[in-house]
């Protein structure tokens, strides 16, 4: 399979998994949330491989990096860095995904007052929308150039 097909496959899987999440706090629900984030990470990983393969001066051996490092490496390329850098910033895609994942992995300490917003359908849909918009923008830009 090509990178584009794999990226789309994992994106479709994440959408299917999102439909199964109820945000009830059960073990199964938390596993589905982790699976949702993991599928998005895999989609991003293959998407960055796809982008790198279309570039004339791509990053060598990028396939060996994790998805976030691939994103960081591509953000150093002048022609596409504006799109990639915006998703590394505090309200960007990668930060939102990492925060969501940490909320699932970390054990809550009931002695602390936490004001952070819990994971919910709205947040996951926002993550999906940001990723799809970025993906569409980059593919369109590279196809036209």
Image: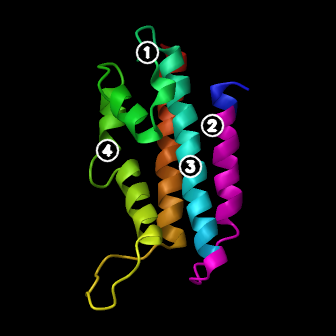
Badge 2: few (under 14), some or many (20 or more) residues near its Cα, within 10 Å?
Answer: many
Q: How far apart are marks 4 and 1 (CA)?
A: 21 Å
Q: In the shown orientation, is residue 13 left or right of residue 49?
A: right
| Residue 140 in sight in this render | no
Q: Quadrant of the N terminus?
A: top right
Could you tell which of marks 3 and 2 lies nearer the N-terminus?
A: 2
Q: Distance between the residues labelled 3 and 4?
A: 15 Å
Q: Where is residue 43 in the image (x, y as percent from the top left)?
A: 58, 41
Would you say the residues marked 4 and 2 are in contact, meaning their CB atoms lie under 8 Å apart?
no
Tell me what residue is drawn at x 47 percent, y 66 percent. Answer: 123
Badge 3: few (under 14), some or many (20 or more) residues near its Cα, within 10 Å?
Answer: many
Could you tell me which secondary element the residue under label 3 belongs to? helix
Q: Name the residue under label 4.
A: 88
Disc number at residue 7? 2
Would you say the residues marked 3 and 1 are in contact, meaning their CB atoms lie under 8 Å apart?
no
Give the answer, above or below, for where 79 lies relative to 66. above
Residue range of the region highlighted in magenta in the rendering: 6-28
Q: Position of residue 39 (x, y in %)?
A: 61, 50
């Amino acid at each position: 399979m090509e990178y584009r097909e794999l990226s789309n496959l994992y994106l479709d899987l994440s959408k299917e998994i999102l439909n199964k999440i109820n945000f009830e706090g059960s073990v199964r629900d938390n596993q589905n949330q982790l699976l949702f984030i993991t599928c998005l990470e895999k989609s991003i990983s293959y998407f960055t491989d796809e982008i790198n393969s279309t570039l004339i001066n791509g990053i060598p051996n990028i396939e060996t990096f994790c998805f976030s490092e691939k994103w960081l490496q591509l953000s150093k390329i002048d022609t596409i860095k504006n799109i990639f850098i915006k998703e590394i910033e505090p309200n960007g895609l990668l930060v939102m995904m990492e925060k969501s994942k940490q909320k699932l992995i970390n054990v809550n300490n009931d002695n602390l007052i936490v004001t952070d917003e819990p994971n919910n359908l709205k947040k996951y849909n926002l993550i999906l929308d940001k990723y799809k918009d970025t993906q569409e923008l980059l593919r369109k830009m590279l196809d036209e150039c």
